[in-house]
Image (tube, rainbow, N blue to C red):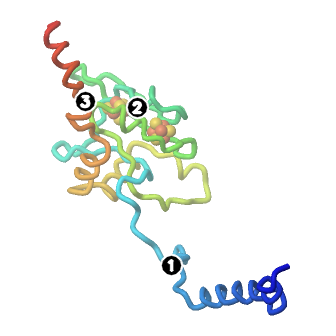
């Protein structure tokens, strides 16, 4: 054992160093948030409760009942019931999501060709009954009104979900060859 090591052991230097570190953190600012008293804004684009987009012009759902979202849903928790309207157009009678089964993958959002379903940033919806997590069309539209209507909904959708035209563009070399084939 070296002399230096001997001194360290006799005077408990390492222990004193550890205690000093603990003491230093005693007076440091706490980083723990006292939720729910202390809250922070959800991160933009975070995946919270679902909503059906309400068309600003008609005041009705944008959804046309094509069923793509339900087909893509890995949890099979979207249920759509349609009928034929007077003008032979599809009418969405019921659109329901069993939120307790959802894994928040957002495949439904990505699959929808009409931008008719979104995941809002709202995440505080705990409850005591299973029924309260079964969202009907009316409740999903209410979610849109509450959490996403107006500029927020438009911006959110544009920023996080709508594929940008450049994302869909083919690489320049491929584009040339496709053009040549055509
Ligand atoms: S987020 Fe995923 S699991 Fe949830 S409803 Fe949409 S597709 Fe289904
Ligand atoms: S939400 Fe979109 S993908 Fe789903 S049924 Fe309606 S229009 Fe089709």
According to the picture, the residue beneath numbered tag 1 turns out to be 37
Front residue of 141 and 170: 170
Between the C-alphas of marks 2 and 3, the distance is 20 Å
For residue 69, the mark is: 2
Between the C-alphas of marks 2 and 1, the distance is 37 Å
Mark nearer the N terminus (1 vs 3): 1
Considering every residue shown, the one lying at the far top of the view is: 181
**Residue 66 location in percent, x, y?**
34, 25
Q: Which of marks 1 and 3 is in front?
A: 3
Instruction: Name the element at disc 1.
Output: loop
Going 14% across and 9% down the picture, which residue do you hit? 180
- Can you tell me which quadrant of the image ligand 2 is in? top left
- Left or right: residue 34 versus residue 81 is right
Between the C-alphas of marks 1 and 3, the distance is 44 Å
Going 33% across and 52% down the picture, which residue do you hit? 144
Mark nearer the N terminus (2 vs 1): 1
According to the picture, the residue beneath numbered tag 3 turns out to be 168
- On whether ligand 2 comes within 8 Å of the CB at mark 2, the answer is yes
């Amino acid at each position: 054992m070296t002399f230096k090591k001997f001194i360290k052991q006799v005077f408990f230097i390492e222990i004193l160093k550890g205690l000093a570190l603990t003491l230093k953190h005693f007076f440091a600012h706490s980083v723990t948030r006292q939720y729910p008293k202390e809250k922070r804004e959800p991160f933009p684009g975070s995946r919270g409760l679902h909503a059906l987009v309400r068309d600003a012009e008609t005041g009705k759902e944008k959804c046309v009942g094509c069923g793509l979202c339900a087909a893509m849903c890995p949890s099979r928790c979207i249920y759509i019931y349609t009928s034929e309207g007077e003008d032979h157009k599809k009418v969405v009678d019921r659109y329901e999501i069993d939120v307790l089964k959802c894994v928040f993958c957002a495949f439904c959002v990505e699959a929808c060709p009409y931008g008719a379903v979104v995941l809002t940033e709202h995440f505080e919806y705990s409850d005591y009954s299973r029924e309260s997590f079964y969202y009907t069309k009316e409740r999903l539209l209410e979610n849109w009104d509450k959490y996403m209507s107006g500029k927020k909904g438009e911006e959110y959708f544009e920023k996080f979900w709508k594929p940008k035209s450049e994302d869909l563009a083919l690489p320049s070399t491929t584009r040339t060859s496709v053009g040549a084939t055509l």
